[in-house]
Image (cartoon, rainbow, N blue to C red):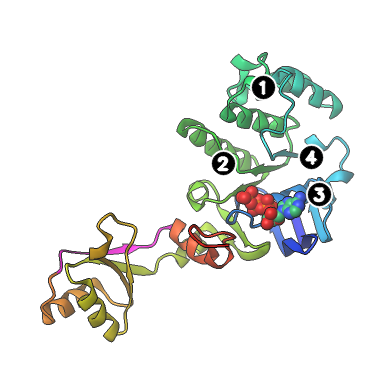
Amino acid sequence: MIEVNELTKRYGKATAVNGLTFTVRPGHVTGFLGPNGAGKSTTLRMLLGLTEPTSGTATIDGHPFRDHPRGLRHAGALLDAHDVHGGRSAVTYLSALARSNGIPRRRVDEVLEEVGLAPAARRRIGGFSLGMKQRLGIATALLGDPPVLLFDEPVNGLDPEGVRWVRGLFRRLAAEGRTVFVSSHLMSEMQNTAEHLIVIGRGELIADESVAEFAARGTRQRVTVRTPDPTALAAVLEAEGASVQPDDSVADAEEWLTVSGLSAARIGELASHHRIVLLELATRTASLEEAFMELTADSVEYLAGESR
Ligand SMILES: Nc1ncnc2c1ncn2[C@@H]1O[C@H](COP(=O)(O)OP(=O)(O)OP(=O)(O)O)[C@@H](O)[C@H]1O
């Protein structure tokens, strides 16, 4: 189990993590979500004792990670896949880690097999692709067969087959009763893997709930409508209390509107009454990704096109 209590990290005047409190339980995958710069990596680094908190505590199975002798047997982590000395082979690198953590040598071959790197075991890590480095990072995390696993953006650089493999691996590790905590800045990466979500923005907790609860936020329905006269239609719909936005997610954007607060049937009736031609009309439910973007919109560090 992972417990974070009133955890804060400041760098000078900048606050990376601000009074975070949450618990990650064993037995299912927990997603750690937030836009770029939200404070995910800083939180994971504090959990692993690599960054000193300004205040608050972060513990693994009741103790700060540093207090666990032979750390890799208590918690395994993938942080920055590039952070490995490139001159050694995967076998040499993992064997040294196994020795210093009191882990039997046979685990090295087992984890290399598990992550699909057995054929590349004796090649220099420096020549590995990003995807292979991610696999090596995952092998490192698994080496000590630990009850707690932390992964920071693990699917970066993996091809679609690799992404599918890693999702299955996380679910299996969780089903074995381990605590599995996985960070991502994309909801779509988590929705088929995680059962629980911790969402942060600008270092603060935004949501701590099951994926099912999170999904319920996104069930608000909208209607998309295409018309040659969007200005007239928008005026009619707004007069009926609807909220109307141009839909700039499509190619011929000037003809499209996104409407909330009125049903498709009512929009059709109003258009007919006012003799406005409709070319298309459809109801759609917001995706989890949209619900996530809405939830974190206020905490996105740099918006595209925004002047700084
Ligand atoms: N060593 C540091 N010195 C100064 N500021 C830092 C340091 N490390 C992180 N920060 C700042 O703290 C904030 C949180 O960064 P962090 O890397 O934890 O976010 P993140 O959620 O992991 O983002 P990303 O998905 O982009 O990796 C950012 O504004 C970042 O610039």
Query: Residue 47, position in %: x, y?
Result: 77, 50
Confirm whether the magenta stretch covers residue 305. no
SS at mark 1 in the image: helix
Separation of disc 4 and disc 1 at Cα?
28 Å
Q: Earlier in the sequence, mark 3 or mark 1?
A: 3
> Toward which corner of the image does residue 21 lie, by quadrant?
bottom right
Residues tagged 4 and 3 counted as in contact (Cβ below 8 A): no
Query: Residue 135, position in %: x, y?
Result: 61, 29
Vertical arrangement, residue 54 with respect to residue 142, above or below: below
Foreground mark, 4 or 1? 1
User: Which residue type carries mark 4?
Assistant: His
Separation of disc 3 and disc 2 at Cα?
28 Å
Label 4, on which residue? 74
Q: State whether residue 40 appears in this view.
A: no
User: Which residue type carries mark 2?
Assistant: Arg
Between 2 and 45, which is closer to the camera in this rendering?
Answer: 45
- The region drawn magenta spans 278-288
Between 18 and 235, which is closer to the camera in this rendering?
Answer: 235
Badge 4: few (under 14), some or many (20 or more) residues near its Cα, within 10 Å?
some
Label 2, on which residue? 171
Query: Is the shortest distance between ligand 1 and the CB of mark 3 under 8 Å?
Result: yes
